[in-house]
Image: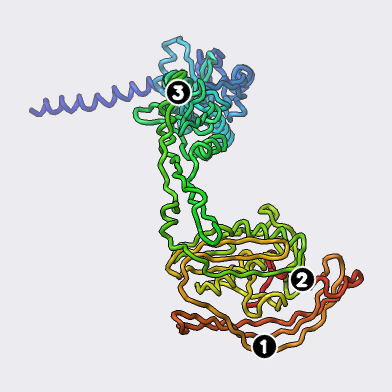
Amino acid sequence: MARAIRSAGNRRLALPVAAGAAVLAAGGLYAAGLAAGDVPDGTRVRGVDIGGMSRSEAQRTLDRELTAPFGAPLTLRIGDRTEKAEPAALGLSVDTAATADSAVNDSLDPVSVIGRLFSAENRDIEPVVGVDEQKTRAAIARMGAAAERKVRDGAISFEEGRAAAVAPVTGTSLVQDRALDALRDGYLRADRSPVVMPVKQTPPRIGRAEIDRAMNSFAQPAMSGPVTLTLDGEAVTIAPSTLGRHLAMKPGAGDRLTPALDSKGLLDDPEVSSQVRRAAQGPRNAVLGLDGERVVVTQEARVGHQVEEQALGRAVLPLLTREGAARTSEIPAKAVQPEFTGESARRLGIKEKVSSFTVNFPTAPYRVTNIARAVERIDGSVVLPGKEWSFNRTVGERTKENGFVDGIMINDGQYVKSPGGGVSAVATTMFNAVFFAGVKPVEYGAHSFYIERYPEGREATVAWGTLDMRWLNDSGNAVYVKAESTDTSVTISFFGTKKYDEVSATKGPRTNVKEPGTRKGSGPECEVQTPLEGFDVAVGRHFVKDGREVGRENFTTHYTPRDEVVCAPQESAPGKAAQDAEPAPEAAGATEAQ
């Protein structure tokens, strides 16, 4: 038993001796392998033999041999774009020092060292790529920006009466987090084939096949000729160029292009709207006139038609894929009844003259023109029970475009020239017709200073945008307004049914009298003005029915003094401007006393 143990013990002692001998032998072989040089024999970098060289010798050799091939431009393919770039601009280079170190360090592995003692095989290693991160990131960002292309669906446009295909575009973007690896791998590729950069491509929803289908089935037929719509025998012809301005094809269900017609735009198009207005005339109210002092219907009402935009679109769209005579259809139109017909006029209760008033004025060309223009717009007005009449709304803005000319009016207490002078004579006449008809004044205002030819406290002026002459028909029956003028007078009469047997006026004395001052002016715009005192005056309106007074209203008016204006150096004859002037504040900025 003891021998076995010894034997066993002897065997255990013998093992370390054998292992130590092996290590000594391997160490000797490793030392022998290292003695062959820093770079093992047979080591090559891209065909350049650096075996047996020291580190520094290997680096110099690699500098000399690899600079040219690895300095050549790279061809980069980014989607469907191709460009060339210098490696240095991409931040890429061969790090010859690191490559030499790699050749040496890899060779220090003991297995490799000892193996070289028993093998003569060549050993190829890859060059180490140097990366200038700042330059590489900048180059990748530039390539990404250049390669970026937004996806665009194919489309069809309509221009000048023709359909044109808009080609689809596949969206492209550089996958930047994989770009560096692609550049490094491509740089090391021995055959210098194009470096395919990683990109993401997004296909369009509407491709070439769908464009071709839509062009053949709709777009080209739509532009093949005009379409014609008819209404009451009148034709509305819409040319392809007009249609194209309001026609589009948009992606719909199943990524198919479907037609879309802007019906409102088509109806508003001048080339269409003018024809539609001629074909679909609006309603016309019955026109009243006088037969002696009896109001009669002089022109019957007419039913109008209205073409609605949606109906127009529904009529036009189906015609666009048809040919020849089939591109014609009726316009669906809505009948619009007139507000005022001959039959309704006969039920209005217009049976007698209710009131009438005349204002006389000195003739002047501007005054004759402006008064006649205002009268033309007022004459024939029909005011239904409970409705309100407005001077400004009926006559319109007093501008040259509306037929009014320059005249004399009041601004800041002084005569000035401006379009529309003279129409205050019409406003005053209307106010008195309202006064004696017994209907209700709603808005009115007197001139800032008194004009001698008008009744004290019973006169009115108007100013566009600031002062109107409005009244409410509270008589219980319709009122027909007859307006007429001559070169020296204007008359307005109301016809209807009298609410009162008589409406009369009374006037009190002038109070709070103030004397005028004197102003001096000059230049061609200066207008001579004669002086007149300012004062307050009260006017009463009395309502009589069945022989007794049933109501009374008071109107109080304040007039400022009319200062004397002396013009120099071109003085006019005294009193001339005051005699010819019409002090209605029609101009923008004209002021009027309350």
- Is residue 132 depicted above or below 416 in this figure? above
Quarter of the image where one finds residue 415: bottom right
Q: Residue at x 51, y 15 (%)?
A: 43
Q: Which residue is mark 1?
A: 510
Q: Which mark is residue 415?
A: 2
- Give the Cα distance between marks 2 and 3: 64 Å
Mark before the other along the chain sequence, 2 or 1:
2
Position of residue 466 relative to residue 21, above or below, is: below
x and y percentages locating residue 563 in the rendered image? 78, 80
Q: Earlier in the sequence, mark 2 or mark 3?
A: 3
The residue under the point 73% across, 88% down is 514
Which amino acid lies under the numbered mark 1 shown in the image of this protein? Arg
Give the residue at mark 3: 327
Q: Which mark is residue 498?
A: none
The answer to whether mark 2 and mark 1 are in CB contact below 8 A is no
Identify the residue at horizontal 56%, vertical 34% (top origin): 271
Work out which residue is located at the far front of the displayed protein and give it. Answer: 292
